[in-house]
Image (tube, coloured by chain):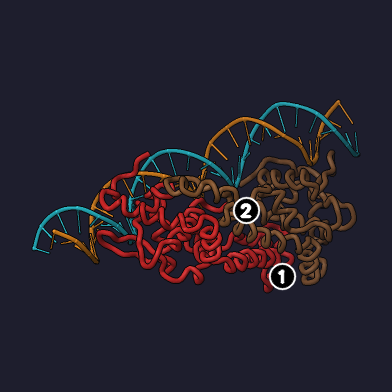
Chain colours: A brown, B red, C cyan, D orange
Amino acid sequence: MKLGDGVEQAIHVTGFLAALPGGAVMSAAALAEFHGVSTSYLLKHLQALSGAGVLETVPGPQGGYRLARAPERISLLDIVLAVEGPEPAFRCKEIRQRGPGAQTVSAALLRNPCQINAAMLRAEQAWRAELRRVTIADIQGEVAAMDDGTIAARGCAFIEQHGRGLNRKDER
Amino acid sequence: MKLGDGVEQAIHVTGFLAALPGGAVMSAAALAEFHGVSTSYLLKHLQALSGAGVLETVPGPQGGYRLARAPERISLLDIVLAVEGPEPAFRCKEIRQRGPGAQTVSAALLRNPCQINAAMLRAEQAWRAELRRVTIADIQGEVAAMDDGTIAARGCAFIEQHGRGLNRKDER
DNA sequence: CCAATCATGGATGGTTAATATCCACGATTC
DNA sequence: GAATCGTGGATATTAACCATCCATGATTGG
């Protein structure tokens, strides 16, 4: 089992946007450079987040992304589902109705859902519940308390620096 | 996020072995044919399960696999970890110490673990706890109650049928 | 003791999903 | 109206997983 890299990037960026003051926006290119990740790839996840209503976008010059609602109302689950999609990790292939073993029990058993599938889904529900409990405000709050607002200040300074010429092609 | 097919096969097979009477064993080839899955592929997971101490193997003619301990003491987590490996789904890439944003906060922040990583790991702990709670006896018990022991009987008959010539090459 | 049976473990293609990139287009602001 | 920015699709590239095969060693039955 593996979770894509995009999830980590998306959470970091969302947490960072939460640290910015007021209605400040930051362009996709600036966000990518500030976090040291690929612009093109981050872009895909930013669009997923705005499509899911987590972020909102400001077009035009000096445009960019910002939070679509208060950080207290954005959970880690919102971000994970936006980036990874809503499908559960365990997909039941209905093995029980394959092979010679299936013929004997088809009548009584198949009316009920697969117990294995049910148990796996229950576990995933517990996982999601835990992610739903943690908000961007939670993790951003802890970070802000530790570095005393430095990140926000550095982010604003970074935006200033890049008033022009940030939409250049990816370098690597 | 996605869970491999091997997990489902492994759980089904383990549950089936739990339904067999006494110390009965079943060969890898018979198990695969009975469940309608590829022998070669199932073999890999059977080996993982025996390596993890979930199943035990009886070599030689009329040999095969059986449970290494009571079904009550085999959890779904045991099987999932044996097949998928022990690594967590979320691997922190330490994005916070990359890019221009990292320089300003290196001192104070990096002493503490990444809050995002901690939250994701906590969620995965909840997932594992739920899987640990469910045993092979639980799911096998529900199945057995429904079909009234038919699966066990059919399994034994299937073993009888295949006294010889089951180790032929994969067909498909 | 010999041969059939079976598990072991490594090696090897094929297939799918995730990663990363690029480009043409439309919207917005200065 | 021109520069800036997001949108969305198309496209390589890479890694993970799926599936298979083969050579080997261990064990049992005759």
Considering the numbered disc 2 on the image, is that residue within a helix, a strand or a loop? Answer: helix
Residue at 74 percent across and 51 percent down: it is A31
Residue B93 relative to residue A64: left or right: left
Residue B159 relative to residue D23: left or right: right
Residue at 60 percent across and 51 percent down: it is A112
Tell which of B62 and A7 is nearer to you. Answer: B62
Q: Position of residue B86 (x, y in %)?
A: 52, 64
- Residue A137 lies in what quarter of the image? bottom right
From the viewer's perspective, is residue B28 above or below residue B105? above
- Tell me, yes or no, if residue A164 can be seen here: yes
Q: Chain of mark 2?
A: A
Residue D26 relative to residue A10: left or right: left
* Residue under label 2: A5
Q: Chain of mark 1?
A: B
Circles 1 and 2 on the same chain: no
Amino acid carrying mark 2 in the image = Asp
Considering the numbered disc 1 on the image, is that residue within a helix, a strand or a loop? Answer: helix
Q: Alpha-carbon neighbours of circle 2 within 10 Å: few (<14), some, or many (≥20)?
A: some
* Residue under label 1: B109
Task: Choose mark 1 or mark 2, whichever is in front.
Answer: 2
